[in-house]
């Protein structure tokens, strides 16, 4: 294995490991010299466990960015929980969350507002993480599940259940997950030609998304007026009325999928250097890619099942996280935190911009995403003219 991680592994020796071979002069200072060399070449915070046999390197800037995003998320959450027709001070919000609030503040904070907030955090984190995985696999910032049709496939599954079969909320959620997963597997199979290339995955995904959008439009036209209105609200993406019933399955799914994504993260980073390089490092490229696609699609479909198809969070969150961390590689945890922050801020704005009218959060994320794309295109155009 080459790169910084292998350098750390080569230079940091565990106790009892093989010593220098014959004719090899030890580095000055022994292990202390090796440790100094690691610190010089591979900057960052290092954690050790099991007597030094397990070492973890945490780059300082991504770590600081993650804590900053987490602090911003907590701040916005406290403001969102305390703002509304019944205003609660930040101190009273914290008391209510700790179980020491009054009856009124406990009801407003924990019963009325907290479930919606938590659904937004979980959905945003799932979308941010899903977008980071897809953009890394496609090696293209447009490789987002809402661009390449996977969210549209999840919406198709949900609409079939809503408008054709008449299923309940649980059936709609299951159909959304199955629709997204089926779409992803079809796109993956159609993109496969001695491996899956990023540009081919994006083109096939865009085509599949366009086809499924026409199916969704047909289902809406054939539905009754009341059913079409309810489906249109759901297709916009909204957190209105979301509660513990939507939070529990979404949180359980993300709690299972998040560790799976982190375990596959090292393979994803190696694959960014190219399939040939990853194979030379012992990475089972196609199996890893398929596993990552399944994990990312399930994250996206879970978010869609909980709140409907929400645009631009999966597209913008990984890019913003990468710019903040100044990282050339994939940034899974910062992308998840950025997605949660974006969706929480968007929902807070959707509730307050035109209060007492509450907009669906999908309208606000689309507006923010459009502004972000305009800024990105302008920035790239100016950079190209230099």
Image (cartoon, rainbow, N blue to C red):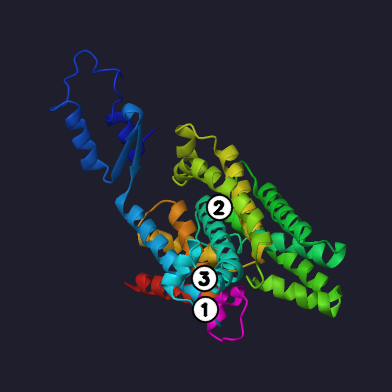
Q: In this rendered view, identify the residue nearer to me: 79 or 357.
A: 79
The residue that mark 3 highlights is 102
Question: What's the distance in space between the residues labelled 3 and 2, CA to CA?
Answer: 55 Å
Say which quarter of the image contains residue 7: top left
The residue that mark 2 highlights is 198
Query: Which SS class for mark 3?
Result: loop
What is the span of residues highlighted in magenta in the rendered image?
Answer: 349-369
Q: Is residue 181 left or right of residue 131?
A: right
* Figure check: 79 above or below 149: below
Query: Which SS class for mark 1?
Result: helix
Count of marks placed on residues: 3
Number of the front mark, 3 or 1: 3
Number of the front mark, 1 or 2: 1
Q: Quadrant of the C terminus?
A: bottom left
The residue that mark 1 highlights is 349
Dots 3, 1 in contact, CB < 8 A: no
């Amino acid at each position: 294995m080459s790169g910084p991680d292998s350098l750390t592994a080569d230079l940091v020796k565990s106790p009892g490991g093989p010593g220098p071979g014959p004719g090899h002069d030890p580095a000055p200072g022994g292990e202390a010299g090796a440790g100094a060399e690691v610190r010089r070449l591979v900057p960052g915070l290092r954690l050790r466990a099991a007597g030094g046999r397990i070492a973890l390197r945490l780059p300082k800037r991504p770590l600081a960015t993650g804590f900053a995003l987490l602090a911003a998320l907590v701040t916005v959450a406290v403001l969102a929980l305390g703002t509304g027709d019944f205003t609660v001070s930040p101190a009273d919000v914290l008391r209510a969350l700790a179980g020491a609030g009054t009856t009124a503040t406990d009801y407003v904070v924990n019963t009325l507002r907290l479930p919606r907030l938590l659904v937004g955090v979980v959905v945003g984190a799932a979308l941010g993480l899903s977008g980071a995985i897809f953009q890394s696999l496609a090696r293209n910032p447009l490789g987002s599940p809402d661009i390449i049709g996977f969210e549209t496939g999840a919406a198709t599954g949900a609409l079939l259940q809503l408008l054709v079969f008449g299923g309940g909320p649980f059936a709609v959620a299951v159909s959304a997950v199955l629709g997204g997963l089926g779409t992803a597997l079809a796109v993956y199979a159609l993109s496969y030609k001695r491996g899956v290339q990023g540009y081919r995955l994006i083109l096939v995904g865009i085509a599949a998304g366009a086809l499924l959008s026409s199916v969704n439009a047909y289902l809406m036209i054939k539905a009754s007026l009341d059913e079409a209105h309810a489906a249109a609200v759901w297709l916009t993406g909204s957190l209105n009325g979301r509660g513990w019933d939507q939070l529990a399955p979404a949180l359980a799914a993300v709690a299972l999928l998040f560790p799976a994504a982190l375990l596959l993260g090292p393979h994803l980073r190696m694959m960014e250097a190219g399939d040939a390089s990853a194979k030379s490092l012992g990475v089972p490229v196609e199996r890893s890619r398929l596993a990552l696609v399944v994990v990312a699609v399930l994250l996206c479909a879970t978010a869609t099942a909980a709140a409907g198809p929400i645009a631009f969070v999966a597209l913008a969150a990984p890019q913003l996280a990468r710019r903040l961390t100044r990282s050339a590689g994939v940034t899974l945890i910062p992308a998840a935190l950025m997605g949660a922050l974006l969706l929480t801020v968007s929902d807070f704005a959707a509730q307050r911009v035109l209060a007492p009218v509450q907009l669906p959060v999908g309208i606000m994320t689309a507006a923010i995403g459009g502004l972000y794309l305009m800024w990105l295109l302008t920035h790239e155009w100016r950079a190209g003219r230099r």
